[in-house]
Amino acid sequence: MVQAYVLIQTDSGKASEVAAAISEIEGVTSCHAVTGPYDVIVSASAEDVDALGHLVVSMIQPVEGIDRTLTCPVIRI
């Protein structure tokens, strides 16, 4: 199992709409609109890195109102 945080910048005024849409996607474990340099922070999990990439590129990034994403995989040290 691979877990990651996806930091999202949205178009102005779209954070709530983007967060609501993303929270419905399978594999998203939590999704919050926040303040700061990013507008939405997503916690996601997938079976492997390829499935995580599919989740981000094919399911999350196409959501209307997203400007940019940064995916931060969780590591275990």
Image: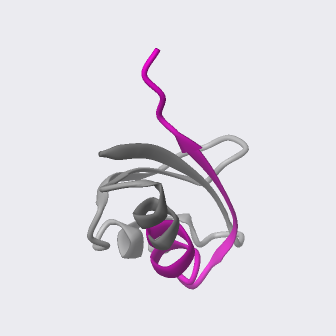
Front residue of this view, candidates 24 and 46: 46
Along the horizontal axis of the image, is 2 left or right of 34?
Answer: left
| Residue placed furthest toward the top | 77
Q: Say if 74 sits above or below 67 in the image.
A: above
Front residue of this view, candidates 71 and 33: 71
Dividing the picture into quadrants, the one containing residue 65 is: bottom right
Front residue of this view, candidates 76 and 62: 76
Return the x and y of residue 67 as percentages of the image width and height: 72, 71
Return the x and y of residue 47 as percentages of the image width and height: 30, 56
Q: Is residue 17 magenta?
A: no
Return the x and y of residue 76 as percentages of the image width and height: 42, 22
Q: Say if 36 sits above or below 55 in the image.
A: above
Along the horizontal axis of the image, is 2 left or right of 17?
Answer: left
At 44% across and 69% down in the image, what residue appears? 55
Along the horizontal axis of the image, is 75 left or right of 72?
Answer: left
How many numbered discs sit on the rendered protein? 0
At 28% across and 73% down in the image, what residue appears? 24
Dividing the picture into quadrants, the one containing residue 61 is: bottom right
Q: Image quadrant for the N terminus?
A: top left
Q: Say if 25 sits above or below 34 in the image.
A: below
Dividing the picture into quadrants, the one containing residue 22 is: bottom left
At 44% across and 60% down in the image, what residue appears? 52
Q: Say if 72 sits above or below 47 in the image.
A: above
Q: Which residues are magenta?
A: 55-77
